[in-house]
Each structure stands twice: as C-alpha cells, then as structure tokens.
Image (spheres, grey):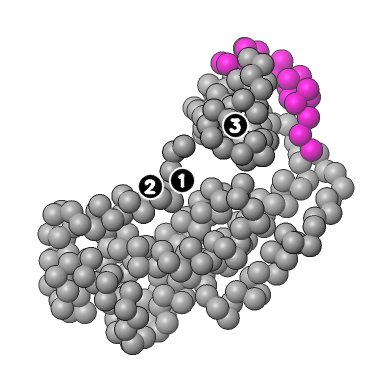
Amino acid sequence: MDPVPLDRLERELRRELSSSALATRFASWAEREPALARFAGAEELLRFLRRRPSPSEADRILLALLRLARLEAAAGRVVLVAVLPGLKALSQRVLRGADEREEVWSALFVSVWEQICAYPVERRPHRVAANLLLDTLQRTLRAIRANRSTEALIAFDFHKARSVWAVSDDPAADVLLERAVAAGAITSAEAELVFSTRFDGICLAEIAAAQGEPYNRVKVRRQRAERRLLLWLGYPPVPRRAQRRPPSIARVADVGLTAQTGA
C-alpha cells in the first residue's frame, strides 16, 4: 500500500532541508535576517525550535522566516516544517474518521500555507506559532464544515446521472470522464474508479482489496467523486432530511470553540 500523502510530503520537506541548494539560500537569509545568523542551516534552526526556547526567541526566528517567505517559498516551507507537529495535533481535533484524513490534511495545508504567505509580521509579532495554528484551525474548520453541510444536502442518484450524461454531445462515459478530468472536476484515479465500478462491472470490494484499503474508504472516495462530477455536469444538489449522527462524531461541531485555548 502506498504511503499517505502526508508521509510523502514530510519526506520531501526533510530532503529539501538537507539539500545543498537550501544551505546556499539559508546563508543568504542569515545575512539579511540577524535572528538566523546563529544557525548553520535550517536543520539546526529546527532542532533549536524543537527544544522549546523562550517565546521571544521563537518569535524572532519565525518572524524572520515569515518575512522571507513573502518572497521565497523555501523559507515558508521551513516554517511549515516547524509547525508540522502542531498541525498533527490539530488534525486529531478535526477528524471524524479515517476516511476524512485526506480531506482534512488537504484543508490544513491550504490554510496554513495561506497564513504563512500572508502573516502580518508587523501587526502580530508575539505568539507567532500559536497564531498560525489558531488561524489555520479556524479556516480549516470553516472549510470542513461547509463541505460536510454540502454532503448532507446532496442525495446522489446514479441513474439520474446517466440521464444527464445522455444529453451531452458525446454520451460515451469514458469520453465524458476524460473531459471531467481535464476540467479538474475529478482526478484521473477517481475517473478510473467510477468507470471500473459503474461501467466495467468490477466490484468495489475487489478494488478496495486490491488497493489494500478499507471498503468504506473507497466507497466514500467514489461517492465524493460522483458528487463533484454531477455538480460539474450542472446537476443540482437535491435537499434531503438531515441525517442523525451518533454522539461520538457529533462532538466535532463545537471543536472550534474548545480548540481556541489549546492551539
């Protein structure tokens, strides 16, 4: 089974930190930002931050990197590695189940990168890491809640979807799926999943077993791809009664309030 995207991203970031290219860039950063001059490179800087220095020291270092991140993405990626342990803690607050892992981490990365690239250095010079994480949590929760609300209102009917497809200029499902991939509505892997199970007659359980993934995770992945496909085709969402959720997952609704004190 392939590693999850988070693992791959973390490895790629670690490789960049140890590269000669970043070492050269870091030397130039140290000349422009005195707070970085004491460190031989990004890895030494991150080790220092992991030892939890005083808040004022940590703020000076992060502010220097954030100023650089406005012009150089590599500096922003160093900040990303620095706050990654905090992001992992946030993900546990937001996740309802393993099937949401990819969606939640996607929202987290988008949100934290927006904060890193546009952090108001002059206006918020204190508690920088906490500010980044709290803002990221709030933006992620808004995105996830909006998506969950949309999913609760969409009643997917694949037979109706076929009737929508039939009115297109070329009703061939494979051609339509290719167009959807080209338009960015779904990924090529999602198109293959939909075509294999809906048209080739391959059992969803067989695909899940072949990929080494839980059946429910693959089923949810297909459902979400099909919903996006329907919306791309112009098929409107169909309201339905809100589903009752068990208490064990309903608790997530108030996570934004409880998380503000611990981010």
Cα distance, mark 1 to mark 2? 7 Å
Which tag, 3 or 2, sits closer to the chain's start? Answer: 2
Label 3 neighbour load within 10 Å: few <14, some 14-19, many 20+:
some
Q: In this view, does 263 lie to the left or right of 143?
A: left
Cα distance, mark 3 to mark 2? 21 Å
Cα distance, mark 3 to mark 1? 16 Å
The x and y percentages for residue 163 are 76, 19
Q: Are marks 1 and 2 in contact (CB under 8 Å)?
A: yes
Quadrant of the rendered image containing residue 249: bottom right
Which residue is disc 3 drawn over?
208
Residue at (64, 70) in percent of width and height: 256
The x and y percentages for residue 262 are 55, 78
Give whichever of 198, 92 is nearer the camera. Answer: 92
Q: Do the residues labelled 3 and 2 touch (CB within 8 Å)?
A: no
Which tag, 3 or 1, sits closer to the chain's start? Answer: 1
Name of the residue lying farthest toward the right:
241
The x and y percentages for residue 85 are 43, 66
Q: Inspect this view and state whether residue 139 appears.
A: no
Write the start and end of the magenta stretch as one range: 155-175
